[in-house]
Amino acid sequence: MLLSNGKNNKQKVLELSKKGIELNQPETVLKTPFVFEFLGIKENKPILEKKLEYKLIRHLEDFLLELGRGFMFIGSQQRISIGKNNYYVDMVFYNKILKAYVLIDLKSEK
């Protein structure tokens, strides 16, 4: 960016570097929708949840960049107890900006 034309642009880049990222909208932290092109899954072809989970974990760096800013991977198939029922969440992340856990349970059907 600093190699681009004009002194005005270099000044804007300098201002941005000093100001940092403004977190004034949810889209600044969480991306929507998610695009998983990096997995190489053909469009309109069903995929099993387990296979999707495996592919995402194998491409974790790309997946974290797709999610947004500040995400850290905690684990997969994490047990969550609600009342007397146990559930297993496909993927658990922590977002250091939001200071919150983000649970992703993959569903390939409605």
Image: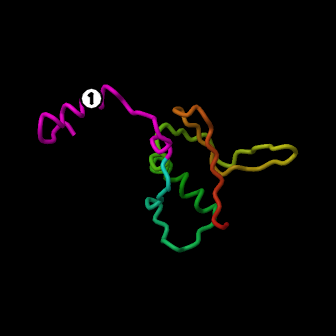
Q: Residue furthest front?
A: 24
Identify the residue at the far right of this view: 84
Q: Residue at x 52, y 53 (%)?
A: 58
Identify the residue at horizontal 45%, vertical 41% (top origin).
Answer: 28
Residue type at mark 1 is Glu
At 62% from the left edge and 38% from the top edge, which residue is drawn? 101
In the image, residue 82 lies in the stretch drawn in magenta: no
Quadrant for the C terminus, please. Answer: bottom right
Quadrant location of the N terminus? Answer: top left
- Identified at 36% across, 30% down, the residue is 20
User: Magenta segment range?
Assistant: 1-30
Circle count: 1
Judge whether residue 20 is colored magenta. Answer: yes
Report which residue position mark 1 lands on.
15
Indicate whether 25 appears above or below 32.
Answer: above
* Residue 83 % position (x, y): 85, 43
Please state which of residues 54 and 30 is positioned toward the viewer in this rendering.
Answer: 30
Determine the residue located farthest toward the top in the rendered image.
18
How packed mark 1 is, by other alpha carbons closer than 10 Å (few <14, some 14-19, many 20 or more), is few
Q: Percent from the top left, x then y, of residue 9? A: 18, 37
